[in-house]
Amino acid sequence: MSRIGKMPVALPKGVNISIDGSTVKVKGPKGELSQTFHPDMSIQQKDGKIVVETPEDPAYNAMHGLTRALLNNMVKGVSDGFSKTLEIEGVGYRGELQGKNLVLALGFSHPVPVEAPAGITFTVDKTQRIITVEGPDKQMVGQVASNIRSLRPPEPYKGKGIHYQGEKVRRKAGKAGKAGGK
């Protein structure tokens, strides 16, 4: 058995779960998530906790831990939510909200609009340099943040571009002969 898979998932107050065979729906204050799991995984609700059980075959150990981790992310997502923070570096680079959508100025000849998928919200701070992507689905939040970062990844010479908050951007030295004489 998987060590992670053996741990039960606690259900906080305000979170409801419905298990229909291999499909699990979790509803909470931040939204509703649904996912279908492998039919051999036995998912049950016992004493306010979700328990995942698996056949004794060792081939199911990894799937056991994965199923429990996905269920935990669903419960945490609908109760607390997930967020990723991106920083914009560069002269004239900025982001702003237009309704629910994000519009980025990234040094191109045109603004770059980013449409918010269902369940995802954007916030931009007053300096227009920090973007926060929030939502109940961990995978969707990470994917949207990655898509925004890929619009202008940080370049290694000046560090201009979009990067995750706390991400180390590897910097390179410029031209070595620039400081030399004639």
Image (cartoon, helix red, strand yellow):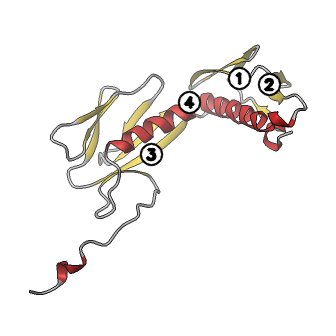
Q: Earlier in the sequence, mark 3 or mark 1?
A: 1
Q: Horizontally, is 19 left or right of 175 in the view?
A: right
Where does the image place residue 140, in percent across and percent down from the top left?
Answer: 51, 31
The reply to whether the C-beta atoms of the residues labelled 2 and 1 are less than 8 Å apart is yes
Dot 1 falls on a residue whose secondary structure is loop
Residue drawn where x is 17% and y is 37% of the image: 110
Where does the image place residue 158, in percent across and percent down from the top left?
Answer: 28, 63
The residue under label 3 is 85
Residue drawn where x is 82% and y is 29% of the image: 51
Residue at the outermost left position: 182
Residue drawn where x is 55% and y is 37% of the image: 82
The residue under label 4 is 137
Structural distance between the alpha carbons of marks 3 and 1? 30 Å
The residue under label 1 is 37
Q: Quadrant of the N terminus?
A: top right
Structural distance between the alpha carbons of marks 2 and 4? 21 Å
Q: Amino acid at mark 4?
A: Asp
Dot 3 falls on a residue whose secondary structure is strand
Disc 2 residue crowd, few under 14, some 14–19, many 20+, Cα 10 Å:
some
Disc 3 residue crowd, few under 14, some 14–19, many 20+, Cα 10 Å:
some
Residue drawn where x is 35% and y is 44% of the image: 125
Q: Quadrant of residue 115?
A: top left
Q: Earlier in the sequence, mark 4 or mark 1?
A: 1
Where does the image place residue 98, in percent across and percent down from the top left?
Answer: 27, 29
The residue under label 2 is 41
